[in-house]
Amino acid sequence: MMNMPSAASRIDLLIYAHDGRGLGHASRGVAVGAAVRRLFPELKVLFLSGCRQTAALIGPVPLDWIKLPAYENVIVKGTPRARVGNTNLKNSYLVKSRTRLIQAIMAEYRPRCVLVDHEAPGKRAELVASIESTPDTSWILGLRGVIGRVEDVWSREALCLFKKHYRALFWYGDETVLGCETLRTIENRYGVQPFITGYVSRLKEILFWTAPTARTDRPNAGTIAVSWNSPAATSVLAGLQQALAGMGDQYGPWRIFTNNGKDLFKDLPFCRVEELSSRYLFTLLNSKTALVYGGYNSITDILCAKVPSLVLLRDVADREQEDHLAKLAASGKAAMLVLSETEVSADRLQAALEKLLFTAWPQNSRLNLDGAENAAKKIVEYL
């Protein structure tokens, strides 16, 4: 018979973030984990995800993590669809195997608290068996500022599971920007008053674990991040090459982070292209403008870096990014221009980037970006 771990070997906090189509879930979890390690270094913390970019997201933070086999999604007519991932396992088996792996991890470490991002049952309900078999674990759900039309968040099954087994709900938003509509919806559906953390910024936490990076007197013209591998993203890069060629080197160097279309910029000596890495954050801090996609992770990066930015919207049906960016723009607290990736052209890109280059830099941010720290302190209250 297997011996159960002692109280001394029981971890205090397990942070679960499923791997979706972007990095927002993992980014929020890493940020909260980093804040716990910073504020309460004596606590035992693990991060759990299938997100293959997790190591890059963690960077210098002393946060250990466990990698699950990854899910893969593809966008079909604006809707995410599951596809076979790099394991080449059928999705039905991958769900079963991940469910069993999570159960084994829970049995081994018996976490006192588990923080779950976005979906109470976990991706494809892979947490349900573990939730129902751990009565001495406190389960906490964290929801992003604008949730969107995500069935798995609002489903009857998710709500019933939350009400039966979860102890608390965090809202990773700033009500002075996003208003109270989402908060009221959460309260009505989940039957609890959410704890408002503020925006969870991974960049803000990463800066605590690195040497100070001062603003330079000669910043880059801009930092560009295009992480998606899709026909629309390829079209964006082609339009961007034409826009930067039209602008020339008069504004300074451009740093482009992408794993696709690198050869497009080989004839532009003022453009440096490299693969996405942790260097992106520090380049962003010293750039007069940025071009990013509109996910939670990228938005909190540019808000923390205080960089006027051009934000691209992906063509997805849940409208989360579109609604979020509309509220941010209306608040007047963020200097950004927004374009749909389907509306991108070289002329539009050039006009937008040149307008942003003449915007005040760095911006004076008035947003609540203390979400990771506030969530960490609240978790410790439950511990």
Image (cartoon, rainbow, N blue to C red):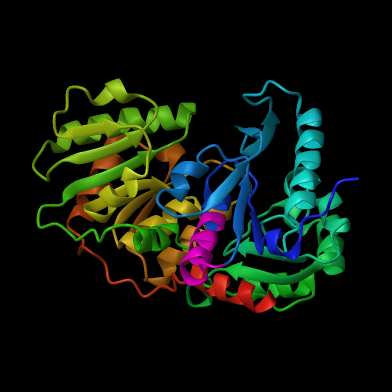
Q: Quadrant of residue 90?
A: top right
Please indicate, yes or no, whether residue 199 appears anywhere in the rendered image: no
Farthest residue in the right direction? Answer: 1
Q: Position of residue 210 (x, y in %)?
A: 32, 57
Apparent side of residue 357 relative to residue 151 in the rendered image (left or right):
left
Q: Nearer the viewer, residue 149 or 381?
A: 381
Q: Is residue 7 above or below residue 83?
A: below
Horizontal and vertical percent for residue 311? 39, 50
**In terms of image quadrants, where is residue 272?**
top left
- Above or below residue 38? Residue 257 is above
Between 8 and 359, the one nearer to me in the picture? 8
Q: Is residue 37 magenta?
A: yes
Q: From the image, which quarter does the C terminus lie in?
A: bottom right
Seen at 57% across and 65% down, the residue is 145
On the rendered image, what quadrant is the N terminus found in? Answer: top right
User: Vertical placement of 361 versus 277: above or below?
Assistant: below
> What is the chief secondary structure element of the magenta stretch?
helix
Residue at 14% x, 29% y is 269
Q: Residue 96 location, x and y as percent?
A: 82, 35
Q: Is residue 74 left or right of residue 59?
A: right
Give residue 70's quadrant in the image: top right
Tell me which segment is drawn in magenta: 29-42
Residue 108 in view here: yes
366 over 144 or under it: above or below? below
* Residue at the image position 47 percent from the left and 59 percent from the top: 325
356 in the magenta segment: no
